Image (tube, coloured by chain):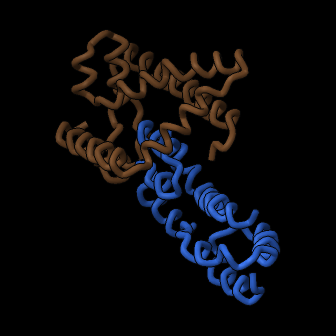
Amino acid sequence: MPHNRNKLYSILLIACIAGYIWLYYSITSNVSGNNKTAEVCLIKHATNIPCPSCGSTRSIISLTKGNFVEAVNINPIGYIVAFIMLIAPVWIISDLILKNNSLFRCYQIIESHLKKPKYAIPLILLVIINWFWNIKKGL
Amino acid sequence: MDAQKVDMFLMSNSKFFESHQMNMIRERLIAHDDSKWPMLSTIQFNDPTTSLIVSILAGSLGIDRFIIGDSGLGIGKLLTCGGFGIWTIVDWFLIQKATREKNMSKIQQFLY
């Protein structure tokens, strides 16, 4: 869908903003009542089985507290999401200021690389392994 | 290309494209010569109905986006539990149009 740079940047910015709002909401609701985060995963709602990225919010929260090992144990995908949420806004804003499209080109290169089976299949296997680990942990 | 061949192609592949683009596709294909016909008949288009079914059943995992070839958006959907569920529901409605647009871009190389 993102055929041009502005669409991609606006999608990423909206996603990052939504992510930060969600993170803020999760941290404040965690602090006030020690209640767990709200359930957003449709799969978990419907079938009681967690999806591969269930627990990523909890993982990022433990990263903000400094527990790197605990973040891996809850869900390693939290690292990827945290990385993207940190890097993407900075890169997008620097691209907008410099009137560049380096992020867009990087995105297209990565996308064309990941489509190839020799990269796609190990990644899919990693996701499935993470999924089974989530189910085993009972997230 | 032969008008009859083009009409047959369009009849069998009409569900893969948006309705308002069919006319343009027909005119451009007829205006072309026959050299690209073998390649044209071997392209695999994505069925919008299939991607809709996949989206409803496994939309949270982003599989529907991966199928139409939007790997980046698919990864984003996967990492965020289907965009907090919101993107999953939005994609139930968007995925058919997105599939048809992807098919359109696949056939673009034969239209010009």
Residue A20 visible in the picture: yes
Q: Quick one: which residue is furthest to the bottom in this view?
A: B4
Judge by depth and name the residue closer to the eye, A61 or B101.
B101
Asked whether, in this view, residue A5 is left or right of residue B86, the answer is: right
Q: Residue furthest front?
A: B35
- For image coordinates 28% across by 30% down, the residue present is A75
Q: Residue at the top extreme? A: A66
Observer-nearest residue: A25 or B63? B63
Residue A48 horizontal/vertical position (percent):
30, 48
Horizontal placement of A17 versus A62: left or right?
Answer: right
Q: Is residue A83 left or right of residue B93?
A: left
Vertical placement of residue A131 versus B106, above or below:
above
User: Where residue B105 appears, x then y in whole percent?
Assistant: 66, 58
Shown in brown, the chain is A
Q: What residue lies at 42% left-to-right and 28% top-to-bottom?
A: A81
Chain B takes which shade in the image? blue
User: In x, y percent, where is residue B75?
Assistant: 45, 41
Query: Residue A106 is drawn in which quadrant?
Result: top right
x and y percentages locating residue A72 in the rendered image: 25, 25
- Residue located at (65% from left, 73% from top): B36
Q: Quadrant of the N terminus of chain B?
A: bottom right
Residue B85 is at least partly visible in this image: no
Q: Quadrant of the C terminus of chain B?
A: bottom right
Depth order, front residue of A25/B78: B78
At x 68%, y 87%, the residue is B8
